[in-house]
Amino acid sequence: MGKLRVAVIGCGSIAKNRHLLEYHNNQTVDIVAVCDIVEERVQEAAKKYDARAYIDYQQLLKEEQVDAVSVCLPNNLHAPVSIAALIGGSHVLCEKPMATSREEAENMIDTAKANNKKLMIAHNQRFVPSHVKAKQLIENGEIGKIYSFRTTFGHGGPEGWSADGADSWFFKKDQAFIGAMGDLGVHKADLLRHLLGEEFTEVVGFIETNAKEKTDVDDNAVCVLKTGSGTIGTLTASWAYNAKEDNSTIIYGEKATLRLEDDPDHSLIAQYTNGEVVKYQLGKIQSNDEDGQTNTQVIDNFVSCILNDKEPLITGEEGKKSLEVILAAIESSESKQITKVL
C-alpha cells in the first residue's frame, strides 16, 4: 500500500502547529491538499508541504482522492465538514469540541458508521505521558478508591495563539458556540472520563464572561462534577490565567494523591498515605509555548488506526460523551440547577 493521502481543512494555528507538522513527520502520510478561506494562509501551507491549495472545502473533496481529512475549523463547521468528508469516502480526524450540539455529534457518528469510515476526535490530553501513567496507576489499584479530583485548564486566551489574534473566531458565538468551555473545558471533561473510567451523571456549572471585553462567549467557568459511583470534584476552564498557563489535574484516592502537571519539574507526583512520595519525569505536556510543541501522538494514533483497521482511542462516541458534560454544564449555568448528563 502506498502512502495515506491526507487533506487538512483549516490552516490556522492548530493545523500549523500540530496537524500539518505531525502528518509531515509521519513517514506513512502524504499531505496532498490544504484548504482555508484565507488565500495567503492556505498558499503558505501549500508551499511548505508541497500540497494543492483550495479555498473551498467542497471543491477539495470533489477534486481530490483523499484517504483521510483533518477538520481544523471553527466549531460551527466541525459537523458539516466532517459529514461531507465522511460521505466523500474519507476517514476524519476532527478537532474538539466535536460539534455544537448533541444532534450534530450523533449525525457525525451515524455518518461514519454508514460509510464505514473512522471518526476520531482530537482530544490530545489522553496521550500526555503523565496522564497515561496515571491511568495505569488507577487501573492497577495503586491509589485505591477515588474520592475526589480537581482539574483546570487555563491560559491568557486565544488572542495569544490563534492565527487571527484578537479577531479570532474563538470570540464569536456564531462560530465558536462556546468559549473557554469548548476550547479548554471539554479537554478536561474527556481526560477525567478517561482517567476515572466512568461517566459523569450530574453537573453544576458556573459559566461567566468576565475577563474579555469584546466577546459574547464564556471566558471563565467552574463546574462541579459527580460520577455514577459518587466521586465528586471540580473542573475549571479559563481564558483569564494571564501570567501563566495552568493545565493541572489532582486525583485524591484512598491510598494516594496523584498530582499531574502540577509541578514544574515532575509531570507526575504520587503521594502515598504511608508517607512514600514517587516523582516521575515523563516529558512535557503539550502547550501553546514554543517548547511545548511536542508530538501529541493524536495524528500517529489516527494514521495507525486507519492503516491497521483499529478503533481510534477517541471515537466519535467518546467525543460525544465528553461534549455531553459541557452541554450539561451550560444548561446548569442557565437554569441555576443541578443538571443530569444525558
Image: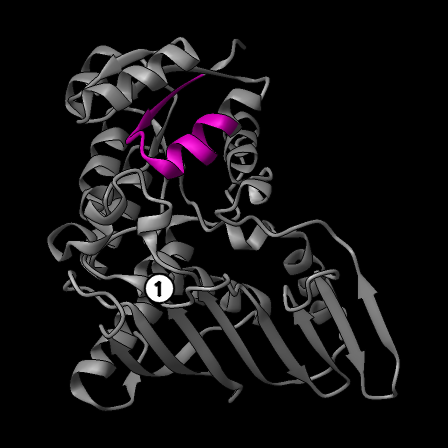
Residue at horizontal 28%, vertical 75%? 328
Q: Residue 133 location in percent, x, y?
A: 72, 59
Q: Residues within 10 Å of mark 1 (few under 14, many from 20)?
A: many
Q: Amino acid at mark 1?
A: Trp
Name the element at disc 1.
Answer: loop
Please state if 113 lies on the left or on the right of 330 as rendered. right
Quadrant of res 207: bottom left
- Residue 296 can be seen in this image: no
Residue 84 located left or right of residue 239: left
Closer-to-camera residue (110/328): 328
Is residue 8 inside the magenta stretch? Answer: yes
Q: Residue 182 appears in which quarter of the rendering?
A: bottom left
Q: Does residue 208 lie above or below 23 as drawn?
A: below
Q: Look at the picture and state if 77 lies above or below 249.
A: above
- Residue 229 placement (x, y as % from top left): 52, 86
**Quick one: quadrant of the C terminus?**
bottom left
Give x and y (percent) for residue 66: 34, 17
Residue name at image x 15 percent, y 54 percent: 172
Q: Nearer the viewer, residue 107 or 298?
A: 298
The spot of residue 3 in percent (x, y) is 51, 12
Highlighted range, magenta: 5-21
**Which residue is tagged 1?**
239
Front residue (pair 185, 290):
290
Numbered marks: total: 1
Q: Quadrant of residue 291?
A: top right
Residue 138 in view here: yes
Taking 269 as reference, is 73 above or below it?
above
